Image (cartoon, rainbow, N blue to C red):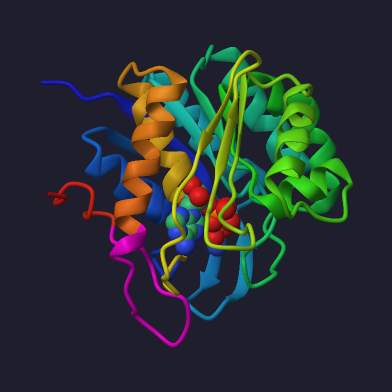
């Protein structure tokens, strides 16, 4: 027996809802084999991020070397990338080992406002990793920050943003509308030819910690299984929607999703 192999390069969330923990749960639920390279350890819970401890650059490189020299991964997903030198290293491995299914979730900060990838790293991300991506999945805040815009608040502003972000060389962009005001959360996928809207009635749910990580990981699992980007995104949207519907409370703040909800759906 064999399973498609999916690698996440991301930060650890001690609360278990986002980062590496969300990614590995998602890979498992989608019948793929999950591997992990950890960029940083975050001391985090449902209330916020209390501390960030990046692993050393040597520690990062050792993990990358161990995985890539032995295991042929089918797809890679990246999350929290810490700083420009970490991004440089990761880009080198992605290029040298011909990874051709790459999902970049350009995590810049947590919902509670902690910096998870340094602002100065945006240029490195844009120049070295972005052009290698099958898809980049910014939320509205990340997209606005990377474009140098004050904010993105409407679907027509989202359309303008997705076209501009596509010019930076990724095969496709999925701009997520989870933070859009109003009753709908629309995601836009642009692959250079077709713009696809994925509209979704907003689920009234306070427990949404880790939605972005979960969506990007589900896309990576779908790609690893040989699906097209459109089919992978469509499946990933169903996966995250089921998981959000069954989000639950584990502490004082915003709780995690239920990653097994998609498997148990009717
Ligand atoms: N309340 C909701 N109802 C339905 N779908 C949602 C809701 N919130 C987020 N989503 C969906 O979840 C996915 C993640 O979107 P979002 O914009 O929240 O990402 P993010 O901000 O990167 O996530 P995170 O909160 O993990 O940082 C998108 O597909 C979005 O449409
Ligand atoms: C480790 C980590 N990665 C990503 C996010 C964004 O949800 C988070 N809160 N924590």
Query: Is residue 94 among what the camera can see?
Result: yes
Image quarter of residue 133: top right
Q: Residue at x 82, y 52 (%)?
A: 119
Residue 39 colored in magenta in the image: no
Is 125 on the left-hand or right-hand side of 249? right
Q: Residue at x 62, y 73 (%)?
A: 51
Task: Using the image, determine if residue 5 lies above or below residue 45.
Answer: above
Q: Tell me the chief SS of the magenta region.
A: loop
Task: Using the image, determine if residue 121 lies above or below residue 45.
Answer: above
Q: Residue 84 at x, y = what percent?
A: 78, 41
Q: Residue at x 71, y 50 (%)?
A: 154
Q: Which residues are magenta?
A: 244-258
Query: Is residue 41 among what the camera can see?
Result: no
Is 238 on the left-hand or right-hand side of 78? left
Q: Residue at x 69, y 40 (%)?
A: 86
Depth check: give the residue in front, 74 or 52: 74
Task: Using the image, determine if residue 86 lies above or below residue 93.
Answer: below
Depth check: give the residue in front, 146 or 160: 160
Q: Residue 52 at x, y = what percent?
A: 63, 66
Image quarter of residue 42: bottom right
Q: Residue 21 at x, y = what percent?
A: 38, 55
Q: Which of the four quarters of the rendered structure image does ligand 2 lie in?
A: bottom right
Is 77 on the left-hand or right-hand side of 260? right
Depth check: give the residue in front, 260 or 205: 205
């Amino acid at each position: 027996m064999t399973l498609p192999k999916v690698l996440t390069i991301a930060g650890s969330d001690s609360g278990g809802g986002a980062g590496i923990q969300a990614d590995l749960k998602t890979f498992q639920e989608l019948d793929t084999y999950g591997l992990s390279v950890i960029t940083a350890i975050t001391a985090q819970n449902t209330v916020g991020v209390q501390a960030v401890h990046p692993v050393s650059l040597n520690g990062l490189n050792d993990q990358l070397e161990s995985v890539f020299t032995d295991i042929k991964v089918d797809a890679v997903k990246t999350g929290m990338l810490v700083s420009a030198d970490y991004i440089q290293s990761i880009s080198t491995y992605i290029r040298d080992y011909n990874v051709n299914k790459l999902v970049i979730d350009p995590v810049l900060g947590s919902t509670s406002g902690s910096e998870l990838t340094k602002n100065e790293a945006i240029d490195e991300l844009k120049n070295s990793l972005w052009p290698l991506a099958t898809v980049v999945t910014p939320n509205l805040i990340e997209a606005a920050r990377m474009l140098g815009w004050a904010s993105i608040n409407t679907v027509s502003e989202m359309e303008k943003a997705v076209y501009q972000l596509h010019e930076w060389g990724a095969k496709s962009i999925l701009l997520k509308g989870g933070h859009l005001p109003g009753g709908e959360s629309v995601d836009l996928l642009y692959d250079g030819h077709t713009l696809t809207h994925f509209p979704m009635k907003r689920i009234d749910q306070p427990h949404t910690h880790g939605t972005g990580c979960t969506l990007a990981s589900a896309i990576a699992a779908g790609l690893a299984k040989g699906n097209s980007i459109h089919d992978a995104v469509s499946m990933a949207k169903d996966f995250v929607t089921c998981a959000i519907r069954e989000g639950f409370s584990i502490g004082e703040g915003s709780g995690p999703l239920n990653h097994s909800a998609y498997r148990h759906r009717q």
